[in-house]
């Protein structure tokens, strides 16, 4: 069974906007463990599609099936629980909460679980993940004390905190230097290879896109396999 | 070792990012609660003091000359010095009213410092030792015999106020020398500021001191009713059958003061209502700002798996922390206010009964509940709005 099935998905915004139809009749499937990259110009509908795949934006029509289950047949809380337990998000902007340290930001997804008990195991995992992204010594730092690249790496560590089966990354290396960009990509590839995590990554960078097993291009809301 | 992270710590950190804003709300809630605690303590102290005073007099019905009810309450509750008289023959007429078990009478003589007596203005109470049941319970260990002619007892506060604390001293009262032979225990009534002599001395006092009272006159008749008889019914019978007197049942003692207290209570209630509304509006304004300012953060939280209820709980925790802290400070400040500066209020100067621990705890609980509740109510709408923020809308705005 495919991990992800996208069936004739469309997303229309309220009339009067400058881009009333963001996603047009998009269909594709993603197998478990696939690494898919989506390229496209700004405004082509990539972020909207990613939000739909992640259960954050209900499509105007069409279906998204995850492991055979219709995502948008779930009620609000179940959809939220799905995001929390199965999806890791890496946003295209700095998405850390400014009042929390790097360690606390990484721990957040665990504390959002209902009846989250003692976080002893999670604390260890958070520190391990920070070490994995090269920030083991900055666990107590606040986002304002970290560079843009370091903040991005903390957000990546957070995306892996709940060991998601699907990672959705929106321009994950947008503001990183070349070395960090390579490290992040290597981390993604390793997770994909070793843990079988499915990745859908939106990027402008054709070189990065080329490292993915499958490549797609979005244009004017439509999608095509490359 | 990093501190354990959870909802409360997250809420605390959110509050700490703008301490001045949180402090303003804490101060507003604190002022509201301190006013409430002060008001409640004030009213309860006066009410409780009046009830206790009436109970301590040991009489079910007080009978005073017609039109002198206010003066009697001034003497018995407010420790004022006043004289009012009726014919002594009325004692027997009251005794004859159905339902009366026993009666005793007291005559109040007002001293005039320097003119007749060598003590400042005070009340000399002449009582009948044979029938008395009002003074005797407070004699305690003061005296183990009846007062003799030319002997006097002093109330607990007179002992301090007019320098008669030392027994076995002599004082001139209405031209007669009296030996102070004991101090009464504290009664919590106007009797604490009086000097007590046996009724047998009245004739001498009138003859030498010329107080404004005729021989045989009395000021108050205290009556006890038979078991099972309603004192109010008996008071009504006395009023109906003896036109020269007013009868007041024990539960009605202090009614005029309690009436005035009702007005004070209404003013307090109006003030608290307005203050609550203002505090709620402030909470609404503060948390509306907080919700707008943190919309993106809420969007991120929602995106990574926070349910609407989690977001609401996070904000509610912040509101309860602010409201709880403000209320706790308000309880402390209001209690201190009711203990210290409240002495400046004339109505409390004569109030002897302080509030018990239970009553203070209840008032504190009411203060905490109202303060926190007002804060939560005010912040409810912005909090609900924050809970409904959709992650996608926030992400698309980037």
Image (cartoon, helix red, strand yellow):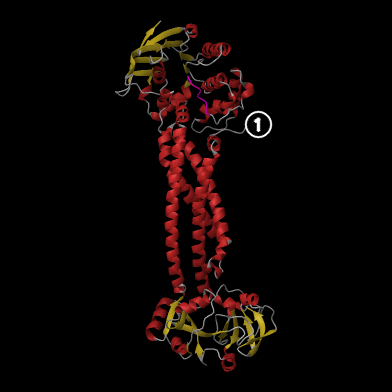
Is A155 above or below relative to B72?
above
Whether A126 is among the magenta residues is no
Residue B156 x/y as whole percent = 62, 75
- Give the residue at x 51% y 21%: A159
Q: Chain of mark 1?
A: B
Residue B286 x/y as whole percent = 46, 41
Q: B27 or B188, which is in the foreground?
A: B27
Extreme residue in the left direction: A15
Characterize the local packing of mark 1: few (<14), some (14-19) or many (20 or more) Cα atoms within 10 angstroms.
few
Main SS category, magenta section: loop
Extreme residue in the front direction: B114
Residue A56 x/y as whole percent = 41, 24
- Give the residue at x 50% y 13%: A196
Q: Is residue A122 visible?
A: no
Name the quadrant containing residue B231.
bottom left
Q: B92 or B38, which is in the foreground?
A: B38
Residue under label 1: B1
Q: How many marks?
A: 1
Is B347 above or below relative to A224?
below
Q: Which residues are magenta?
A: A90-97
Secondary structure category for the residue under label 1 = loop
Q: Is residue A78 visible?
A: yes
Residue A180 x/y as whole percent = 57, 14
Whether A93 is among the magenta residues is yes
For the C terminus of chain B, which image quadrant?
top left
């Amino acid at each position: 069974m495919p991990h992800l099935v996208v069936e004739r998905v469309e997303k229309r915004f309220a009339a009067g906007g400058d881009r009333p139809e963001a996603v047009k009749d998009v269909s594709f499937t993603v197998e478990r463990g696939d690494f898919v990259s989506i390229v496209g110009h700004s405004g082509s509908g990539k972020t909207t599609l990613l939000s739909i795949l992640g259960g954050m934006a209900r499509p105007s029509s069409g279906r998204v099936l995850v492991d055979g289950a219709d995502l948008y047949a779930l009620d609000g809380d179940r959809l939220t629980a799905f995001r929390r337990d199965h999806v890791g998000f890496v946003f295209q902007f700095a998405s850390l909460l400014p009042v929390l340290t790097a360690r606390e930001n990484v721990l957040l997804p665990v504390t959002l679980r209902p009846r989250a008990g003692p976080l002893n195991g999670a604390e260890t995992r958070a520190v391990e993940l920070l070490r994995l992204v090269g920030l083991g010594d900055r666990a107590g730092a606040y986002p304002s004390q970290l560079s843009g690249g370091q903040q991005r790496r903390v957000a990546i560590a957070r995306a892996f905190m709940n060991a998601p089966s699907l990672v959705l990354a929106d321009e994950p290396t947008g503001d990183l230097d070349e070395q960090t960009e390579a490290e992040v990509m290597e981390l993604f590839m390793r997770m994909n290879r070793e843990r079988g995590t499915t990745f859908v990554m939106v990027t402008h960078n054709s070189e990065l896109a080329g490292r993915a097993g499958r490549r797609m291009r979005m244009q004017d809301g439509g999608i095509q396999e490359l | 070792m990093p501190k354990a992270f959870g909802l409360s710590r997250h809420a605390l950190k959110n509050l700490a990012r703008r301490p001045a804003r949180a402090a303003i709300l804490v101060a507003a809630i604190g002022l509201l609660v301190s006013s409430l605690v002060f008001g409640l303590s004030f009213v309860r102290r006066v009410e409780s003091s009046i009830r206790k005073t009436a109970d301590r007099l040991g009489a079910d019905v007080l009978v005073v000359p017609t039109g002198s009810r206010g003066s009697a309450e001034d003497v018995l509750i407010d420790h004022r010095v006043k004289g009012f008289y009726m014919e002594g023959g009325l004692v027997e007429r009251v005794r004859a009213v159905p339902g009366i078990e026993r009666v005793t009478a007291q005559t109040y003589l007002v001293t005039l410092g320097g003119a007749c007596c060598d003590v400042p203005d005070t009340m000399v109470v002449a009582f009948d030792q044979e029938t008395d049941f009002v003074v005797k319970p407070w004699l305690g260990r003061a005296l183990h015999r009846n007062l003799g002619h030319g002997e006097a007892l002093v109330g607990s506060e007179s002992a301090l106020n007019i320098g008669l604390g030392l027994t076995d001293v002599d004082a001139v009262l209405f031209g007669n020398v009296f030996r102070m032979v004991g101090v009464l225990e504290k009664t919590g009534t106007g009797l604490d500021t009086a000097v007590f002599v046996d009724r047998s001395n009245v004739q001498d006092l009138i003859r030498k001191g010329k107080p404004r009272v005729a021989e045989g006159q009395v000021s108050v008749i205290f009556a006890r009713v038979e078991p099972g008889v309603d004192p109010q019914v008996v008071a009504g019978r006395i009023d109906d059958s003896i036109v020269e007197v007013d009868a007041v049942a024990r539960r009605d003692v202090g009614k005029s003061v309690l009436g005035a207290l009702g007005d004070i209570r209404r003013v307090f209630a109006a003030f608290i209502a307005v203050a609550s509304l203002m505090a709620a509006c402030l909470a609404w304004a503060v948390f509306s700002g907080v919700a707008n300012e943190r919309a993106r953060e809420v969007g991120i939280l929602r995106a990574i798996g926070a349910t609407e209820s989690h977001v609401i709980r996070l904000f509610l925790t912040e509101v309860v922390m602010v409201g709880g802290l403000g209320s706790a400070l308000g309880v402390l400040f209001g209690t201190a206010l009711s203990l210290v500066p409240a002495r400046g209020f004339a109505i409390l100067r004569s109030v002897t009964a302080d509030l018990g621990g239970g009553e203070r705890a209840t008032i504190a609980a009411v203060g905490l509940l109202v303060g926190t509740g007002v804060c939560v109510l005010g912040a409810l709408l912005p909090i609900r709005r924050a809970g409904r923020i959709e992650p996608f809308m926030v992400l698309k705005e980037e």
